[in-house]
Amino acid sequence: MSIDINNESGEEIDEQSILDIARFALARMRIHPLAELSVIVVDTSAMEQLHLQWMDLPGPTDVMSFPMDELRPPVKDDEEPPSGLLGDIVLCPEVAASQGQAAPTQHSMDEELQLLTVHGVLHLLGYDHEELAEKTEMFGLQKDIVDGWRAERGLEGPSPAPTIT
């Protein structure tokens, strides 16, 4: 998998954990090993601009996803996954930090960024959370992926609770 990360935020973040959890999520979702993903980390000002431009919503948000080739996970076990450009995930560490601190089970900015990376990957793969059934499916997958990644690394406890609304 080709995953590029570009930190334009000016914040110190754990880039390796973002790369690792993105790879883990893509492998778990059975995305072609030659798929390409870009992760861009921006400050609140840049995220606010993107949020307004693409969602017509004021203020910064935590994560945005911009799909390219609309890759989807294979439906059948014997189905070959398509390769191509997955798209871009844009993360905002400042928003992630405030969400992590405000969560019922407080967690670090890096833990929140890991969760948001998986959330962004799922959006790139066509998952959404507008309807209750969609939200249940997406957040269940998100939890399974983050918990699996944390368990594989011997990290204590379950994944942070989703703070994405």
Image (cartoon, rainbow, N blue to C red):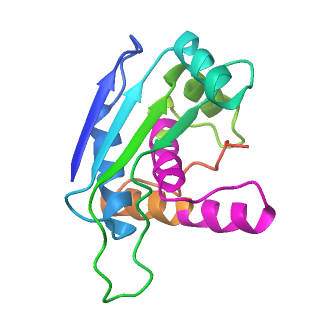
Given residues 135 and 84, the one toward you in this image is 84
Whether 146 is drawn above or below 13: the answer is: below
Q: Position of residue 157 (x, y in %)?
A: 50, 56
Whether 136 is drawn above or below 7: the answer is: below
Q: Position of residue 73 (x, y in %)?
A: 42, 70
Q: Position of residue 62 (x, y in %)?
A: 59, 31
138 lies left or right of 144: right
Given residues 14 and 135, the one toward you in this image is 135
Q: Quadrant of the C terminus?
A: top right
Whether 52 is drawn above or below 105: the answer is: above
Q: Position of residue 92 (x, y in %)?
A: 51, 25
153 inside magenta stretch = no
Which residue in the rendered view is the most extreme toward the right? 132
121 inside magenta stretch = yes
Which residue in the rendered view is the most extreme toward the front? 69
Residue in the image at 41% along x and 87% along y: 76
Q: Quadrant of the N terminus?
A: bottom left
Residue in the image at 33% along x and 31% along y: 14
Residue in the image at 56% along x and 25% along y: 97
Name the quadrant containing residue 102: top right
Given residues 136 and 3, the one toward you in this image is 3
Please, what is the dominant secondary structure of the magenta stretch? helix
Tell me the magenta residue range. 112-141
Name the quadrant containing residue 110: top left
Residue in the image at 40% along x and 68% along y: 29
Whether 43 is drawn above or below 54: the answer is: above
Number of marks drawn: 0
57 lies left or right of 106: right
